[in-house]
Image (cartoon, rainbow, N blue to C red):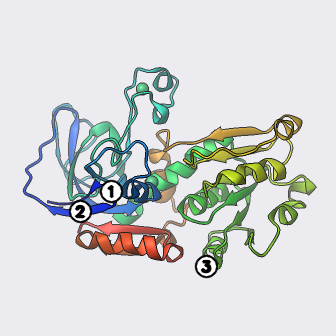
């Protein structure tokens, strides 16, 4: 078995070991085929994810095929294609009881709190495996989790065809949010300092692209939405200072969705929030949106193919991590191929 682990911050290990795994009751053994590398995997590698414990097999965006099902598993059989939902929740605490398992007070995330999917075989709770139609290529299925993260923030903020959406950052978060917002019929503006990323964003349906190094962003969005500014702002860049700007440029009754994990504070004006009755929400992981995303993908409502910029054999994972480190603008989603 090949697995990609972070032994300790800064130390990526590609391990080969003998393992004979069998699913217990309510569990499924999955042969992983494709797995995407996420910004949060990079944070675990750098030691900047406060939740990670080491050593850790990383990876939370992965899809493969069911090999064996444990006792009591219904609805899945050997050979089924599945994508994992990395959110493991207790089901009993307050957030779980009100349908918010992604902020469970006992939350465990595959690849963060528990060993994840960067290995060719993994045992998962059956309830964390979402069946994928055979018509959907497995590399596309492995994109369901990042799209579910976008679906989550747009559900938290609300999204409709009435919205003019400003998205900060044209990386994976920004481009998935762009596609899900477009699917709801919204007009989308996207901002990034990298021209090649903006070009990609135009291909995914951004009506306006802004490079804030060249254009004054507040000025550029002022005339949007009948002169009121964007009704919805998504921070896909995770930069605290952007929240200040988001509050300034958002329209009255605007909503702001945050996904970043920076502990740094920022200066936001109480007056701005109250005067315009802004709604500011956090969005973490996803609240069981993967079945919905799989449906969208199967119906051809998203443009996933252009999201995968590089595919690297799992044994060469170090090269994939080096690429993301050294030339991030050339990548959106780098996938590991477990063959
Ligand atoms: Zn991720
Ligand atoms: Zn819970």
- Residue tagged 1: 63
Q: Secondary structure at mark 1?
A: strand
Out of 318 and 96, give the one closest to the viewer: 318
- Residue tagged 2: 13
Q: Earlier in the sequence, mark 3 or mark 1?
A: 1
Q: Secondary structure at mark 2?
A: strand
At 16% across and 33% down in the image, what residue appears? 71
Please tell me whether mark 1 or mark 2 is closer to you in this view: 2
Residue 231 shown left or right of residue 85 in the figure: right
- Residue tagged 3: 196
Q: Earlier in the sequence, mark 1 or mark 2?
A: 2
**Hey, which residue is sitting farthest right in the picture?**
227
Q: CA distance from mark 3 to mark 1?
A: 28 Å
Q: Quadrant of the C terminus?
A: bottom left
Residue 102 shown left or right of residue 338 in the figure: right
Circle 2 Cα neighbour tier, 10 Å, few/some/many (<14 / 14–19 / ≥20): some
Q: Quadrant of residue 211?
A: bottom right
Q: Quadrant of the N terminus?
A: bottom left
Q: Are marks 3 and 1 in contact (CB under 8 Å)?
A: no
Is residue 198 in view from this perspective?
yes
Q: Is residue 238 above or below residue 24?
A: below
């Amino acid at each position: 078995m090949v697995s990609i682990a972070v032994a300790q911050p800064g130390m990526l290990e590609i391990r080969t070991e003998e393992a004979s795994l069998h699913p217990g009751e309510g569990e499924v053994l999955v042969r992983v085929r494709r797995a995407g590398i996420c910004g949060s995997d990079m944070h675990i590698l750098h030691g900047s994810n406060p939740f990670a414990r080491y050593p850790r097999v990383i990876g939370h965006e992965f899809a493969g095929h069911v090999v064996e099902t444990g006792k009591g598993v219904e609805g899945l059989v050997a050979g089924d294609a599945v994508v994992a939902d990395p959110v493991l929740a207790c089901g009993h605490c307050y957030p779980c009881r009100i349908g918010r398992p992604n902020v469970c007070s006992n939350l465990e995330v595959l690849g963060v709190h528990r060993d994840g999917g960067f290995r060719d075989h993994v045992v998962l709770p059956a309830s964390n495996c979402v069946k994928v139609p055979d018509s959907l290529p497995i590399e596309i299925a492995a994109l369901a989790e990042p799209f579910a993260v976008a679906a989550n923030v747009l559900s938290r903020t609300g999204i409709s065809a009435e919205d003019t959406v400003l998205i900060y950052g044209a990386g994976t978060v920004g481009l998935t949010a762009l596609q899900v917002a477009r699917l709801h019929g919204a007009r989308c503006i996207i901002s990034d300092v990298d021209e090649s990323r903006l070009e990609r964003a135009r291909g995914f349906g951004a009506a306006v692209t802004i490079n804030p190094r060249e254009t004054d962003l507040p000025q550029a969005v002022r005339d949007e939405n009948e002169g009121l500014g964007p009704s919805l702002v998504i921070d896909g860049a995770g930069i605290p200072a952007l929240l200040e700007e988001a509050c300034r440029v958002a329209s009255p009754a605007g909503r702001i969705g945050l996904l970043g994990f920076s502990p740094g504070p920022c200066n936001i004006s109480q007056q701005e929030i109250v005067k315009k009755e802004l709604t500011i929400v956090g969005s973490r992981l996803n609240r069981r949106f993967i079945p919905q995303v799989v449906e969208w993908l199967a119906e051809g409502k998203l443009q996933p193919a252009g999201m995968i910029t590089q595919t690297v054999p799992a044994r060469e994972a170090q090269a994939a991590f080096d690429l993301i480190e050294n030339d991030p603008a050339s990548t959106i989603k780098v996938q590991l191929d477990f063959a």
